[in-house]
Image (spheres, grey):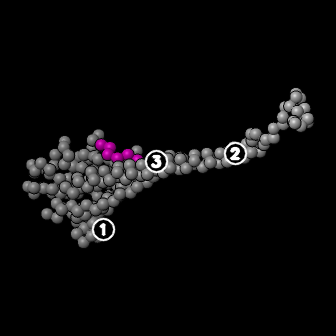
Amino acid sequence: MINKSFKNSLSSNRPLAIICGNAGFSLIELVLSMGIMLVVLSAIISLFTSLNRMYTTQGVAAGVQQVARVGIDIMTRNIRMAGLNPLSTSIIGIVQAAPEIIRFEYDIDGDGYIATDGEEDIAYLLNANNQLIQQRNGNNDSNRSLVDNVSDLTFRYLDADDMDTNDLDAIRTVEVSLTVEEPAGRDKVLSRTYSTRVICRNLSL
């Protein structure tokens, strides 16, 4: 026999009560979740920015170093030829030697004299626009810019005993130092200095 109370509950219009837990998140839980997400997102953005800045800085540094090296290489090749005089017909060599400029001659075509319209009278100097300049025959109209953003160009002259000298006839070695600066973002400037020593073998002949 079916219990009357159970039978009555089935016949009534009241639904059976279903006990279950609360669904969804509370306001506090949502706020905490959003705070954690913002912290993580900020850390990711900061890391990405740092990596991007590091990549940019390294790229600029490599570029500055390469530019300085190219400028030094061009000067080195020419300075090494100073005093070349196959026919020994005249005095050819360094004609101006100062910390900020070097000017020299070489008879590259072997005709016995220095051409006034060629590349046998060369000077290197820094102009007012911070450019490394190659000058021919002492003529400003022949200036050719080789490297931009040069902050320093220095020449040092040594004799056969590696002692500093101001005597043009005694110079045997030239030390060249070139400093180039480039912007690297956020008002930051990268500076690289490249130096080398050039032995002028033709000057000792």
Mark 1 vs mark 2: give the one in front: 2
Q: Which residue in the protein does label 3 denote?
A: 56
| Numbered disc 2: secondary structure | helix
> Where residue 13 sits: x, y (%)?
88, 27
> Where residue 8 sits: x, y (%)?
90, 32
CA gap, disc 1 and disc 2: 72 Å
Q: Residue at x 38, y 57 (%)?
A: 193
Quarter of the image where one finds residue 146: top left
Based on the picture, tell me whether residue 147 belongs to the magenta stretch.
yes
Q: Amino acid at mark 3?
A: Thr
Q: Which residue in the protein does label 2 denote?
A: 33
Residue 47 left/right relative to 190? right
Q: Nearer the viewer, residue 90 or 43?
A: 43
CA gap, disc 3 and disc 2: 35 Å
> Where residue 180 sits: x, y (%)?
40, 52
- Mark 3: few, some, or many residues within 10 Å (few <14, many ≥20)? some
CA gap, disc 1 and disc 3: 41 Å
Q: Which residues are magenta?
A: 144-150
Question: Which mark identifies residue 131?
Answer: none
Furthest toward the bottom, the residue is: 161
Q: Nearer the viewer, residue 133 or 77?
A: 77
Task: Kindly indicate whether the residue at mark 3 contacts the one at mark 1 (C-beta within 8 angstroms).
Answer: no
